[in-house]
Image (tube, coloured by chain):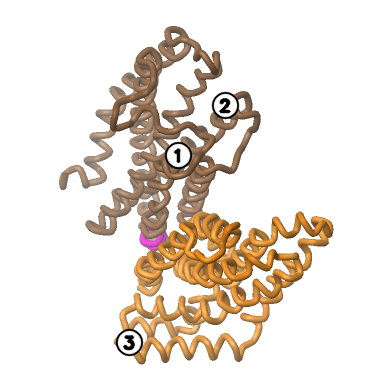
Chain colours: A orange, B brown
Amino acid sequence: MSLILALIRRDLTLAFRQGGGVGTALGFFLTVVVLLPIGLGPDQALLQRLAPGALWIALLLAVLLSADRIFQQDYEDGSLDIMAMGPMPLELVALAKAIAHWLASSLPLAVAAPLLGFLINLDPAAILPLALAMGLGSVALSLLASIGAAVTVGLRRGGLLVSLLILPLYVPVLIFGVSASTAPGAGPDIATPSLLILSAMALASLVLSPLAAAAALRSYLK
Amino acid sequence: MQTLANPARFVGLANAVLPFVWVATIILFAIGLYGAIVTSPPDYQQGETVRIMFVHVPAAWLALMVYTVMALASAVAIVFRHPLADVAAKTAAPIGATFTFLALATGSLWGKPMWGAWWVWDARLTSMFVLFLLYIGYMAVWQAIDEPHRAALVARIVALVGFVNIPIVKFSVTWWNSLHQPASVFRIDGPTIAPSMLWPLLVMGLAYTLLFLALHLVSIRAEVTARKIRQMRLAEIGER
């Protein structure tokens, strides 16, 4: 357990001290949100209807943008070989790195999304469901991204392939994420079926994606 | 099973079986198309356009079946580490992608007169499109990784991860309210489709399956030969 925490702390330190990582994703997120009303025209009613979907698409693309970096550096400088030889199973290494990616890249975006929502006239009633759905959905996004990152870790031009491989897996998260964020009569019962399915997907990917990512990493480490 | 796993024996068997498979495919296609175009009646609502079904539905069945074959072959490859299983999975992908594309294209042609749109983003169509992307991604992995052995290891994982989508496609019309009509052949309470239309559909389904079998055998044979040539080239370079 302490090994996992140490690895997460190391990755977070690297991500925040290096700069670039978190900043780029947030900047990209902001760019999409700012460009959207300019491209679609300033119609408030239209923007309100599009806001949750637009925020989700921006989140998804921003996570994809940082996805191929989850294992890349450690693979290139050999740290990953050391981790593979260490006492911790590679599955847990993959899990720890996915959690670090979530904390450093996806979670800040999910937190920033409701704030940026003000720029595109997000319905105030949708803020709470949106924040909740994005918090849960971003877990699934980061974990699925770790599969894509592991599969393409040894490739020189992996970026495009990551998008192609991960896109099909992101589609269900996007569908249920948007429908959980736009729940019209959110009211007292916040746990809509969509939100429950979204959490099921987050939990399933929590179990399955470290296995897949570790298997993919092993084939490169041989 | 063990003897079949020898690539040379497998190619020998494929050579022996293939002529019969081709003949059976052609005969079944002839019967199926005759039933589809001549004997089956036009639908009382859809008119003659219903005949698109005989091309569209079997293609969609095969799109799912081929991915299942691919995932099964990948699972076998993980467990038994046999190269022939990898070859089977690799060569199934382009055929499956073609069937998926055929299902999407004919569905689009059918959707225009029936729904008034070429494409609708509903559950069945979206999940089918996702299946197409999965095939493309799987083929891209084989393309992107130069070394065949490593490509095989990675491709197995990609195929198995993508298998999650197959039940989603199958049950998408049951789980969500969809514009696409629900299952009408494989149902617990029996098919809800008129017998005069059902038998050509089933014959076409069988014909498509045999066509896949024939194409798959041919491309496995080609892949085995390509690998042999690669080995011989490498050996030749090594001798120099």
Discs 3 and 2 carry the same chain letter:
no
| Residue located 47% across and 48% down the image | B135
Q: Which mark is residue B222?
A: none
Q: Which amino acid is tagged 2?
A: Trp
The quarter holding residue B77 reads: bottom left
| Magenta span | B148-154
| Circles 1 and 2: CB atoms closer than 8 Å | no
Q: Which of the pair B233/B103 is nearer the observer?
A: B103
Residue highlighted by disc 1: B173
Between marks 3 and 1, how big is the CA–CA gap? Answer: 48 Å
The answer to whether residue A129 is visible is: yes
Q: Main secondary structure of the magenta part?
A: helix
Q: Marks 3 and 2, Cα distance to the nearest angstrom?
A: 58 Å
Front of the two marks 3 and 1: 1
| Residue that carries the numbered disc 3 in the rendered image | A86
Calculate the distance from the C-alpha at mark 1 to the C-alpha at mark 2. Answer: 17 Å
Q: For numbered disc 3, what is the local secondary structure? A: loop
Residue A96 drawn at (x, y percent): 42, 81
Q: Is residue B112 left or right of residue B48?
A: right
Residue A22 picture location, percent across and down: 62, 81
Residue B110 badge:
2
* B150 in magenta: yes
Q: Quadrant of residue A164?
A: bottom right
Q: Position of residue B217 (x, y in %)?
A: 33, 36
Foreground disc of the pair 1, 2: 1
Which of the pair B70/A118 is nearer the observer?
A118
